[in-house]
Image: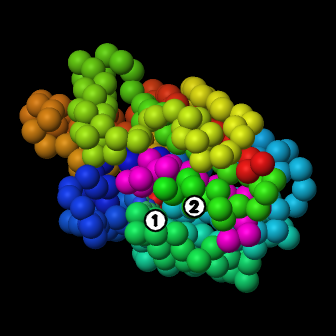
Amino acid sequence: MGDHGHGHQHGHRHGHGHRHGHGHEHGHDPDALPELLELDAEVLHEYRDALLDQVQDLTGGAPRRILDLGCGNGTGTLALAGRFPGAELIAVDVSPDMLHRLREKAARAGVADRVRTVQADLDEGWPDVAGVDLVWASASMHHVADPDRVLADVFAAIRPGGLLAVAEVASHPRFLPDSFGGGVEARVHAALAARQAAEMPHRGEDWGPRLRKAGFAVESARHVTIDLTAPLPSATGRYARAVLARMRSGLHDEISAADHATLQTLLDGDGPENLLRRDNLTVHAERSAWLCRRP
Ligand SMILES: C[S@@+](CC[C@H](N)C(=O)[O-])C[C@H]1O[C@@H](n2cnc3c(N)ncnc32)[C@H](O)[C@@H]1O
């Protein structure tokens, strides 16, 4: 979720000793990614709830300290705070803006006293966080430049017996009939996949071997296909719009002028084709999750 265009991940692989622009949406609407993350959590809430159920089962008790790694604006942090009312939450992200939004949300939800934000770039090193019972890393691990180093640091920060949940986007969500616009959605996805393969080489990979290499015992590895049909959650049109707008923002010459025009109709058109007004959307999404334990 959230990686539908370019933006903060752009420039990831460029050179060494980088101070890259994670979390900065240069030239983009600063509300776009936070809004997309909210809509993703809302529309795919059944998937996320089921995953949290599984996490709750495996924790086998009440975790006291929970770390949300690459927390964004905190859809996961807040869900975890709700599930585990006795826990202290530590929310780590490189983006001060995301953390600010998260703190506001925590205050509105009445859990600010249990939520601590820590601004840190995981590529630069591990923040001062230890003794954790549960780590939740949703759509964040594929951003880091050296996952093996970060996973070793996660391992060290978790108490023996503690749990790590890695949730990743296996493929960006799709909303339109295959034939729409002569297959425009598939072309947009293919163009973006080619670009992301270069910018974020760890995206879409099997995290099992890396997790074992770091010392974790993988207790569950699941690939989930989500197909939603009518009646869809009321936020679906806005979610589709947010996803495709972000995808478009990352693509220029990679798709044809005709495809750009079709996207324009979907995103900004006055007619019934506009994603906010269409009545024939579906949601197809693929997610993967690994739940593992520090022995
Ligand atoms: C796709 S968002 C996911 C946010 C949240 N976990 C969720 O599921 O809604 C990825 C997050 O990882 C953060 N991130 C990316 N690279 C990072 C790094 N090197 N260190 C810390 N956070 C990073 C981004 O700022 C962003 O908030």
Tag 2–tag 1 contact (CB < 8 Å): yes
Residue 288 sits above or below residue 3 on the image: above
Q: In the rendered structure, which disc, 2 or 1, sits on the residue that comes first in sequence?
A: 1
x and y percent of residue 121 in the render? 43, 69
Q: CA distance from mark 2 to mark 1?
A: 10 Å
Badge number at residue 122: 1
x and y percent of residue 73 in the render? 52, 66
Residue drawn at 41 percent across, 40 percent down: 203
Q: Is mark 2 within 8 Å of ligand 1?
A: no
Residue drawn at 78 percent across, 41 percent down: 54
Residue drawn at 13 percent across, 43 percent down: 252
In this rendering, the label closer to the viewer, 2 or 1: 2
Q: Quadrant of residue 50?
A: top right
Give the structural element (helix, strand or loop) at label 1.
loop
Amino acid on which disc 2 is placed: Asp
Badge number at residue 112: none
Q: Is mark 1 within 8 Å of ligand 1?
A: yes
x and y percent of residue 68 in the render? 62, 62
Q: Is residue 253 visible?
A: yes
